[in-house]
Amino acid sequence: MKASVPLFAVGYPVAVGVISRWIPVVRERRTAWFAAHTAAVGAIVAGWALERRWSAVAVNGAWLTTSVAWYASRRRARS
C-alpha cells in the first residue's frame, strides 16, 4: 500500500466534515475543529507530495494557507 492512502483516508473525511461546518467553526472559534481541519489538510498535502502530484499540492496547500488566514482574521462572535 502506498503511504499516501492512509493520509487521504483520514485527511479527506475530516477536512470535508469540518468544511461542511466552516462558517460556525470560524465565527465561534472552534479551536479543536480548526486544529483537526488543519492537521487533515496537512495530511492531504503530504499525501499528494508523496505522489508527486504538485498541482494537487498547490491547490490543497493554497486552501490550507487561506483557511489559516481566514480563521486568524476573525474575532469570536459575541453571544
Image (cartoon, grey):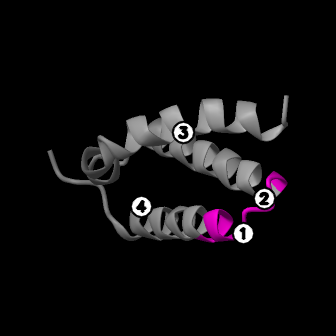
The answer for how far apart the CA atoms under marks 1 and 4 are is 25 Å
Name the quadrant containing residue 21: top left
- What secondary structure is found at the residue carrying circle 2? helix
**Mark 4 or mark 3: which is in front?**
3
Residue 63 higher or lower than 10, as above or below: below
Q: Amino acid at mark 4?
A: Tyr
Q: Main secondary structure of the magenta part?
A: helix
The residue singled out by tag 4 in the image is 71
- What secondary structure is found at the residue carrying circle 1? helix
**Mark 1 or mark 3: which is in front?**
1
The residue singled out by tag 2 in the image is 49
Image coords of residue 65 (percent x, y): 55, 69
- Which badge, 1 or 4, is on the more N-terminal residue? 1
Residue 44 higher or lower than 54, as above or below: above
Q: Amino acid at mark 1?
A: Trp
The residue singled out by tag 3 in the image is 12
Q: Amino acid at mark 2?
A: Ala
- Which badge, 2 or 4, is on the more N-terminal residue? 2
In the image, the segment drawn in magenta is 50-58
Image coords of residue 30 (percent x, y): 39, 41
Report the side of 66 relative to 52 (left or right).
left
